[in-house]
């Protein structure tokens, strides 16, 4: 191949050398002429020559400048606090700065050429998505907030800018990524966001003012939604105004004065006062104001946190009212024993005045008898440990020195372990009731005992009487012997009457209503009354001339009289006069009806008058209350007149009392009077046994008393009956199984040993044979028989001891008369 | 000469060549010191505007031309010799 190239002429060398010499000489001369101070010279044709020295110096300075710029760029690249990546469009790293390499613990050189996926396996895809957006759009993407993991595994928040680098055709060939660590900023922003939402969502109303204390006062710069909710004012309505808009006529001026003083001294304030909502409604506000200082210490704002305590105040007032209700004694104490407050009920109980309490003159320790000090100490320990103490009983010394039994419960205040509240119950009444209750129980157990003894005693008397009758029936006795036997019989009757009195006293008696003559009842009691009243009391009986017919329980009538007599006796400790009178009275429709519960009609009046101490008017209304007694402890049950009242009511009557202190008392008791007195049993000689009605029916006799059983058996056998005697319910059942068809009547004692009562036995047999006739017998029965068990004397019930005559008649009647 | 008169200068340089650079800085220092607040300086780079230098009859750089006050004067060089510059500019003996 033949290339044409300019080739210097072989002989041009000399000429070139000559020209260079000339050139150098020319340069030297120009330097001399310009004293070295000129860089360029120009010819007249405008051609400019840069002198050689200037050329060299210019070349050096350009190079130095380039070097300097590159150096600066490198410094910038490496030392900038941002992470910088140069990446190609395939997500490979071209260059990174030191900050970016440090972050993942590498040297910049180690990262070049690596793919981003290798370096940030978890996040590379996310980053590349943004890269692709920039690559495709050709536009930068700035301010991406994202996370990156550093070599310690911590997650940092970064703000990333991505800038495309294009070639001359505008095609993106590289991408520059610059990221700044904004973790602290993000955290600060998060903190601020939390604080902001706390303020916005706070239940307490928050109000911030400036610190301008001159009139009209600090102006509101911020309020939260709770403020709007509480006051009704929106933020726009209050910004620039002063918090005075919330104050009104009933706002406590002293509190506001304190507030202003505190703020003027740069001190915090807390207080409570009435404020006003936008609609004028009052509410009770509790608030706390704290001054805010800038870094140089100057107060710039006041922050006020407010809450609506209207409900709390109302509750406080209600509790206050509860205490003031004085239903119970309430007091406020401290651990030194000082009683700082209490309600009227407490003051009444302790016997002090409010002035004395307010002067601090009431002291728990001084009020406590020595023996209770330890109990108090124990309660204090419990209070310290748990805040409350178990209720306990103790006594207090009232101001007048009287001991008062109390029950107390105490609690310590949550905010002050030195102080607390105490609720006190006055136990005086309760203690009294307890004592009365014990007395009643004593009486009851006495009654049971008396009842039990009477039962057995009656059985014995029944045997005596029956045997007497059998004896007399023999007919071979001399008249003297008959008189002796009659004497024995009268004695047995008196013994039976005494037993009955005992039962009456213990009230273990069935209500056995029958027609009777009250004159006879009272007469029957005369001996006993004289015995009870004693020799110092003169008793007068004034009987109405005609019989006083009433439908009543004879025993109860005796008890009524007994109770009145005993009361009169107690009213006359030094003796006196007692008048017992019976009279017939009639009340017509219009007048004369004595209070309290009288009614028109014909009545029998039993009056008992003494000339004793009388009953004070204040007590008169209460004498029929159970347990009301003016007698000293142990002497009276407080039940006497209450029982009387009950009995009189049961008999459809009423009681009237007249009393004058110092003069005496009259009790008048009215019972409905019977028209016919013919029905009243006249006392007659008992008929002879062979004159009694008999029969040939078969009777199952259940009686546990081994003496009484043969007596009854003997009497009834003579009357023609077939008797099957057994000693208890179990044996009765055995016989029943065999001879059920024969047995036409059951006569059973109500109270028997062996686990089966007469009532139970009767019910059992009646269930199997409804036609069976049953007669129960007992020395006492009311409480045992129960209220669901109707007993009728002479029909299905016999009170022991009974005469043969009554036994025979009851049996015959039971067989012959229809039930009813 | 009016001591408060405005001085207008035009300095012809060749890029950032050493003498030109020095002349620029000397002129700036001189003006700052001697003619504060009453001078204007125009820089003409003959490498960029060769035709203007030709038209202005400038044959070497750096060349300072005092355009005002008249008469127009030219000084060639780095302007290092203050005394001769003052003389050349007609400021000789002037107490500034």
Image (spheres, rainbow, N blue to C red):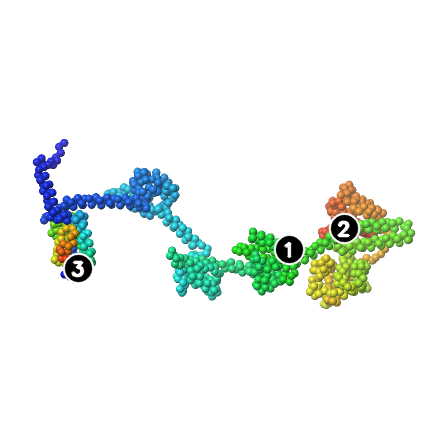
Residue A406 at x, y = what percent? 63, 57
Secondary structure beneath dot 1 equals helix
Q: Chain of mark 3?
A: B
Q: Nearer the viewer, residue A717 or A451?
A: A451
Which quadrant is home to the N terminus of chain A?
top left
Residue indicated by mark 2: A452
Give the left or right position of residue A460, taking residue B11 as reference: right
Q: Chain of mark 2?
A: A
Q: Chain of mark 1?
A: A
Q: CA distance from mark 3 to mark 1?
A: 118 Å
Residue indicated by mark 1: A371
Q: CA distance from mark 2 to mark 1?
A: 44 Å
Name which residue lies at 65% across and 61% down: A401
- Report whether residue A85 is seen: no
Q: Is residue A477 above or below residue A519?
A: above
Q: Which mark is residue B95?
A: 3
- Report whether residue A692 is seen: yes
The answer to whether the residue labelled 3 contacts the one labelled 1, judged by CB atoms less than 8 Å apart, is no
Residue A183 at x, y = what percent? 37, 47
Q: Is residue A679 above or below residue A126?
A: below
Q: Nearer the viewer, residue A266 or A108?
A: A266
Q: Nearer the viewer, mark 2 or mark 1?
A: 1
Secondary structure beneath dot 3 equals loop
Residue B30 at x, y = what percent? 18, 55
């Amino acid at each position: 191949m033949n290339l044409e190239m300019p080739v210097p002429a072989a002989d041009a060398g000399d000429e070139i050398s000559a020209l260079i010499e000339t050139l150098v000489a020319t340069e030297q001369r120009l330097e001399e002429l310009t004293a070295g101070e000129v860089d360029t010279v120009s010819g007249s044709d405008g051609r400019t020559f840069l002198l050689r020295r200037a050329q060299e110096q210019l070349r050096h300075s350009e190079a130095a400048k380039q070097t300097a710029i590159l150096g600066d760029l490198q410094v910038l690249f490496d030392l900038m606090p941002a992470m910088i990546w140069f990446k190609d469009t395939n997500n490979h790293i071209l260059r990174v700065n030191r900050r970016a390499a440090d972050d993942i613990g590498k040297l910049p050189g180690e990262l070049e050429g690596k793919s981003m996926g290798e370096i940030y396996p978890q996040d590379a895809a996310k980053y590349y998505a943004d890269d692709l957006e920039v690559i495709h759009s050709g536009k930068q993407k700035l301010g991406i907030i994202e996370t990156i993991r550093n070599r310690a595994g911590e997650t940092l928040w970064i703000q990333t800018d991505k800038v495309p680098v294009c070639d001359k055709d505008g095609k993106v060939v590289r991408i520059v990524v610059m990221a700044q660590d904004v973790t602290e900023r993000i955290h600060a922003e998060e903190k601020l966001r939390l604080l902001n939402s706390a303020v916005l969502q706070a239940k307490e109303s928050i109000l911030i003012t400036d610190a301008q204390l001159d009139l009209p006062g600090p102006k509101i710069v911020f309020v939260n939604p709770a403020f709007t909710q509480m006051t009704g004012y929106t933020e726009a309505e209050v910004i620039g105004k002063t918090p005075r808009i919330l104050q009104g006529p009933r706002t406590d001026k002293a509190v506001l004065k304190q507030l202003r003083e505190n703020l003027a001294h740069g001190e915090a304030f807390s207080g409570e006062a009435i404020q006003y909502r936008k609609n004028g409604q009052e509410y009770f506000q509790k608030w706390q104001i704290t001054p805010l200082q800038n870094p140089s210490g100057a107060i710039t704002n006041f922050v006020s946190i407010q809450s609506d305590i209207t409900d709390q105040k109302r509750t406080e007032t209600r509790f206050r009212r509860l205490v003031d209700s004085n239903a119970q004694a309430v007091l406020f104490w401290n651990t030194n024993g000082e009683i700082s407050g209490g309600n009227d009920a407490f003051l009444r109980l302790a016997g002090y005045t409010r002035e004395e309490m307010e002067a601090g003159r009431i002291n728990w320790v001084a009020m406590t008898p020595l023996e209770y000090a330890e109990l108090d100490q124990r309660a204090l320990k419990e209070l310290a440990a748990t805040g409350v103490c178990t209720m306990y009983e103790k006594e207090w010394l009232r101001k007048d020195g009287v001991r008062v039994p109390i029950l107390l419960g105490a609690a310590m205040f949550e905010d002050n372990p030195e102080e607390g509240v105490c609720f006190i119950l006055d136990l005086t009444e309760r203690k009294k009731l307890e004592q009365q209750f014990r007395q009643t129980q004593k009486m009851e157990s006495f009654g049971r005992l008396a009842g039990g003894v009477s039962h057995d005693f009656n059985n014995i008397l029944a045997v005596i009487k029956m045997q007497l009758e059998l004896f007399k029936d023999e007919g071979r006795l001399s008249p003297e012997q008959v008189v002796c036997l009659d004497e024995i019989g009268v004695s047995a009757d008196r013994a039976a009457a005494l037993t009955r009195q005992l039962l009456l006293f213990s009230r273990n008696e069935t209500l056995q209503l029958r027609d009777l003559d009250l004159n006879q009842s009272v007469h029957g009691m005369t001996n006993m009354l004289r015995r009870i009243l004693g020799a110092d009391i003169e008793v007068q009986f004034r009987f109405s001339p005609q019989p006083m017919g009433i439908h009543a329980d004879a025993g109860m009538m005796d008890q009524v009289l007994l109770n009145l007599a005993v009361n009169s006796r107690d009213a006359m400790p030094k003796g006196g006069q007692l008048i017992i009178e019976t009279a017939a009275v009639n009340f017509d429709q219009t007048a004369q009806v004595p209070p309290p519960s009288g009614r028109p009609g014909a009545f029998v009046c039993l009056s008992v008058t003494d000339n004793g101490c009388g009953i004070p008017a204040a007590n008169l209304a209460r004498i029929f209350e159970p347990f009301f007694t003016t007698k000293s402890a142990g002497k009276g049950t407080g039940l006497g007149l209450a029982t009387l009242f009950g009995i009189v009511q049961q008999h459809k009557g009423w009681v009237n009392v007249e009393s004058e202190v110092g003069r005496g008392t009259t009790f008048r008791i009215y019972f409905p009077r019977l028209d016919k007195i013919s029905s009243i049993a006249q006392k007659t000689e008992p008929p002879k046994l062979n004159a009694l009605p008999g029969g040939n029916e078969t009777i199952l006799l259940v009686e546990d008393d081994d003496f009484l059983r043969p007596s009854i058996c003997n009497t009834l056998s003579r009357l023609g009956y077939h008797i099957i005697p057994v000693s208890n319910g179990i044996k009765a059942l055995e016989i029943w199984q065999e001879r059920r068809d024969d047995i036409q009547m059951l006569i059973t004692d109500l109270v028997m040993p062996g686990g089966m009562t007469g009532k139970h036995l009767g019910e059992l047999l009646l269930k199997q044979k409804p036609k069976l006739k049953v007669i129960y017998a007992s020395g006492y029965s009311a409480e045992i028989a129960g209220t669901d068990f109707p007993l009728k004397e002479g029909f299905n019930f016999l009170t022991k001891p009974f005469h043969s005559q009554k036994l025979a008649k009851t049996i015959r009647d039971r067989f012959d008369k229809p039930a009813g | 000469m009016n001591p408060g008169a405005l001085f207008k200068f035009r300095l012809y340089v060749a890029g950032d060549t050493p003498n030109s650079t020095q002349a620029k800085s000397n002129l700036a220092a001189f003006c700052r010191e001697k003619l504060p607040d009453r001078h204007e300086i125009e820089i003409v780079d003959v490498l960029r505007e060769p035709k203007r230098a030709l038209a202005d009859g400038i044959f070497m750089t750096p060349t300072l031309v005092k355009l005002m006050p008249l008469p127009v004067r030219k000084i060639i060089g780095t302007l290092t010799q203050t005394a001769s510059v003052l003389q050349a500019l007609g400021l000789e003996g002037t107490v500034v």
